[in-house]
Image (cartoon, rainbow, N blue to C red):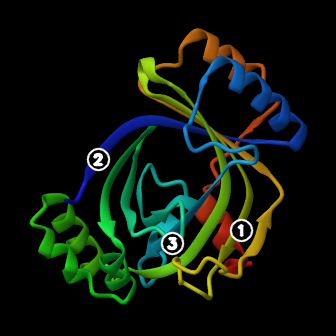
Amino acid sequence: MIDQNVVTRVEKKYEINAFTAMNLKSILCKTLIQDSHNTNDGYMVRSLYFDTFYNNDYFDKENGLEYRRKIRLRTYDPRAQFLKLELKQKEGEYQHKHSLTIPKNMAQRLLDGHYEVLKELNNSFADKLYTIMQTNLYRPKCIVEYKRLAYIVKENNTRITIDSDLKSSESNMDIFNPSLSLNKVTSKTILEVKYNNFLLSYVKDIIDNTNKSQTSASKYCMSRYISYL
C-alpha cells in the first residue's frame, strides 16, 4: 500500500542562536504538544534532493522566484524500509507538499535513475513526478541531514520546528548508509513556523517575543552553497 498525503500551509523560517533556541524549547515543551518522535536533542531528518542537470531548482530559490519546487527523498532512519518521496511547490506565501510513502527498493531504483518505476504505481501524483523528473533530467544532487525538535498545535495544524546540526554531502548519495560521512554546513539553528491561514494568538506571542531574524535560505541551498563560491 502506497500512502499519499497533501499539505498546504504558510511556512516562515528564522535564524536563532543557541541561547534563544534553549529558551524557546523550554517554553514550547510546556505550551504545545511535543512530536512523538522528540528526544532530548531531537530526531534525525535526512533528505536526498534531486535537481535538474542545470540545477534549476537551486537557482530558482536563490533568485527568489515566486513559483518554484523541490523534489526529495526523506527518511528518519537510514535503516528504514520505507521512505517519503516529496514534491514541495512554492506559490506566493503558500507551500504545497505532496508526498508518497514508497518502499526502499523503489527508492533505490529512483537513485539509479529508473524513474519509470513511478509509472508502476498507477497514481496520478506519481505520474506527474515521473514526467517532471524524466523530461527535466533530474539527478540526485545533495544529501542534507539535521536534528529536529517539533511541536504541534492541532487546532489549525500548526507545526513549529527547531533544526540544528545541519550537515550535508554532495559526493555520496547513499541515503541508506548509517555511517554516511557528512560535512558541517552551519552552526546556526533554524526555526520554522508552519500553519494554516493564521497563528493562534498565544503561539504568535511566543514567536513574536523570540529573538530571531527571518531568512529565506533553504537547507538545500545552504548545503549546496559551497559548490557555487
Seen in the image, is 214 located left or right of residue 71? right
Foreground of the two, 6 or 15: 6
Q: Which amino acid does label 2 sit on?
A: Asn
As rendered, which of 227 and 128 lies closer to the eye?
128
Badge 1 amino acid? Lys
Residue at 47% over, 54% down:
65
Q: Mark 1 points at which residue?
A: 167
Q: Where the C terminus falls, by quadrant?
A: bottom right
Residue 158 coordinates in the image, percent (x, y): 50, 27
The mark nearer the N terminus, 2 or 1, is 2
Q: What element carries label 3?
A: loop
Q: In this view, does 126 lie above or below 181?
A: above
Name the amino acid type tagged 3.
Answer: Arg
Please give the residue where the numbered disc 3 appears in the rendered image.
Answer: 79
Q: Is mark 2 on a helix, strand or loop?
A: strand
Total label count?
Answer: 3
- Residue that mark 2 sits on: 5
Kindly report the distance in space between the C-alpha atoms of the residues bearing marks 2 and 3.
22 Å
Could you say which is closer to the camera, residue 185 or residue 46? 46
